[in-house]
Image: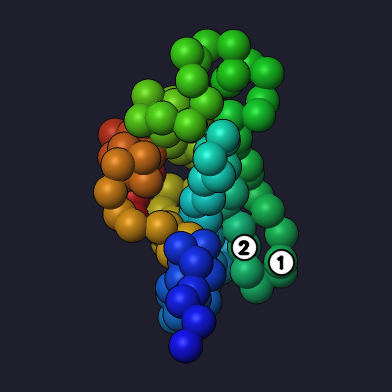
Amino acid sequence: MKKRSRNDMRVMRHERLRRTLSGTAEKPRMAVFHSLNHLYVQIIDDDLGHTLAAVSTLEKSVRESLKGTCNIEAAKVVGRLAAERAKAKGIETVVFDRGGHQYHGKVKALADAAREAGLKF
């Protein structure tokens, strides 16, 4: 029997989560993804299939203020900025989609920073 890779297992967990998680216009989905090099957050209305706000460590303004682009400090900055952009669009509450990643480390730091900045989930 072939052993599945870590990423294949993450994708399976994410598909399982997405069966129950869905974002609406009133309560959009906050999708988190991280690669080995960068962090990405999107706030998505799944009913229309539109991204309402997005933040990543690829952005020049974010990248210049950070020492590294995929660590806990970067996650805090991205989470805070995602919450600010969401609030600017009038979004107060979201559904948190961790993307199959464990709620630990970078993902937890991002979520905590978004909560501290005033986003509810």
Q: Is residue 47 visible in the rendered structure shown here? A: yes
- Report the number of discs: 2
Residue occupying the point 50% across, 67% down = 5
Can residue 80 be seen in the rendering of this structure?
no
Secondary structure under the numbered disc 2 in the rendered image = strand
Would you call the spot at circle 2 few (<14 residues within 10 Å), some (14-19), or many (20 or more)? many
Q: Which residue is mark 1?
A: 49
Sort mark 1 into few (<14), some (14-19) or many (20+) by Cα contacts within 10 Å: few
Q: Image quarter for residue 111?
A: top left
Which structural element holds mark 1?
A: loop
Residue for point 65% across, 50% down:
52
Residue sitting nearer the eye, 58 or 30: 58
The location of residue 60, given as percent across then percent down, is 68, 18
Q: Are marks 2 and 1 in contact (CB under 8 Å)?
A: yes
**Which x, y percent locates residue 56?**
60, 35
The residue under the point 58% across, 29% down is: 57
With respect to residue 116, does 97 lie above or below?
A: below
Relative to 94, residue 73 above or below: above
Q: Is residue 96 above or below residue 114?
A: below
Colouring style: rainbow
Q: Separation of disc 2 and disc 1 at Cα?
A: 6 Å
Q: Residue at x 52, y 11 (%)?
A: 65
Q: Nearer the viewer, residue 117 or 63?
A: 63
Quadrant that contains the C terminus = bottom left
Q: Residue furthest front?
A: 1
Q: Nearer the viewer, residue 38 or 50?
A: 38
Asked whether 65 or 93 is in front, the reply is 65
Q: Which mark is residue 45?
A: 2
**Mark 1: amino acid:** Gly
